[in-house]
Amino acid sequence: MQGVVKAMNKTKKTGYILGISGLVVLLAFLGWVLTILFEGEQPRIRVELQDDYLSGPRKVVVWAQDTRRGLRSMEVSLEQEGRKVNLFETRFPFRGVFNREGVRRFQKEIEVDPGALNLAQGQVDLTVTVLDYSRRRGGDGNLSVFRRRLIVDTVPPAVMPLSRMHYINRGGTGLVVYRASSDTVESGVFVNRRFFKGFPYGGEKSRGYVCYFAVDDSLESYPSIHLWAKDRAGNTARASFNHRVRWKRFRKDRIHLTERFLKRVMMKFEANSQEQGRDLISRFLKINRELRKENARFLEDLMKKTSPRKLWDGTWLRMKNAATMARFADRRDYYYNGKRVDQQVHRGVDLASLAQSKVEAANSGKVLYAGELGIYGLVVVLDHGQGLASLYGHLSSISVRPGQEVAKGQELGRTGSTGLAGGDHLHFSVLVGGVFVNPVEWWDPHWIRDNVTKKLALLQG
């Protein structure tokens, strides 16, 4: 009998323990359910927009994410002076137990057109509102709100030429002086599709700009030339100005390549090259073509470092007591064994005097580059500001360093025959916005006065 009583007591005790355990499990389960139902993590919102300006139809990418209960709804709107414009609104369906099959991530691309939406010029607020399926906030869910203030600006900047007439030689330099509105962030001149950057001049109050531009000698037809400006919102404007291009013709020159010359050149460029097994003329043509193009790209990139200030003054100096051996834009035909093998354009003026003659700065400026540069050999490049530069090539020695400021007439180095030079001379070039132009213009005081000085005076009053 006592055994039966003990067994019954043990059974009661076990049942009690199981009851307590079941209650704990039930409470834990309920807690887990409530934690899921009433989770407090807010949805995440991201808006991808290039900048804060609406100057025309723009694409806005809106992204939302909720990894817990899932997304319930999204609304995207614009608000301006009490007026609300709905751009997009959607509600996401509840799917599966606890919305496990619901939408967790969503992305929407929206086009915002200030004209079609009748938005006024000025500020407008972009608002993105996202709710999830949490039972918080009385069952409305966790709320995330994203706001970003934008500027509606669909009015283009104003740009107006001040200089009246512009005569530009094919292969030469032009200068236009102009004014632009205060919201202008970039301006300059387009010659066909090539852009030449303009620079502020004459102080902030004048809102004056100067732009040196080039008419490339390689152009075969009359170019389209106009002023261009862009404001902070990305609006652009263009304006014409009076100009006339003089259609210059250039000399043709024959260069006969000899075995002796080719061997001497290859020794400069191929000290340890694998190309030495190929024939001389093929190796030379690779340098004359590919390396020439590579050097031109280097110089064009180098010109992007130009100073926004004018660093030069007066007529540019020509090398003293030097004979002209080759002119700017000579069309050179290269012959080998009586057959034409290549054609290139000479991008400067070759000046020859005594061997290792002193090379002086054509005008004041700052050294952009000093060292080896492919076909030009040892070279010095001076920045004269506002997109103007001069190049001194085939030097035997250099006496300046990059970053150094130099005065007009200061020694830069000595002439030589480095690079593709056939003998001791100076290769002198002028560049405008990375384009080679005729240096002869810059040596002419009358050209400087008529095409530069008189125009700059319009902004110095």
Image (cartoon, rainbow, N blue to C red):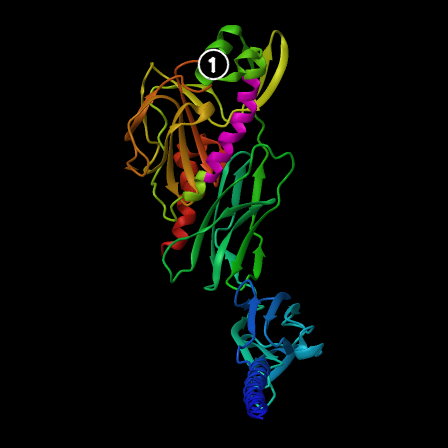
Regarding residue 8, the answer to whether it shows in the image is yes
Image position, residue 97 (x, y; %) = 69, 78
Q: Quadrant of residue 321?
A: top left
Check the image and report above or below for 442 versus 150: above
Please name the residue shown 64% across and 10% down the image: 339
According to the picture, the residue beneath numbered tag 1 turns out to be 265
Image position, residue 226 (x, y; %) = 57, 50
Please name the residue shown 57% across and 59% down the image: 236
Image position, residue 316 (x, y; %) = 36, 34
On the rendered image, what quadrant is the N terminus found in? Answer: bottom right
Report the magenta residues as a range: 284-301
Q: Quadrant of residue 320?
A: top left
Q: Which three-letter amino acid code belongs to the residue tagged 1?
A: Val
User: What secondary structure predominates along the stretch shown in magenta?
Assistant: helix
Check the image and report above or below for 54 versus 2: above
On the rendered image, what quadrant is the C terminus found in? Answer: bottom left
Residue 57 placement, left or right of 230: right
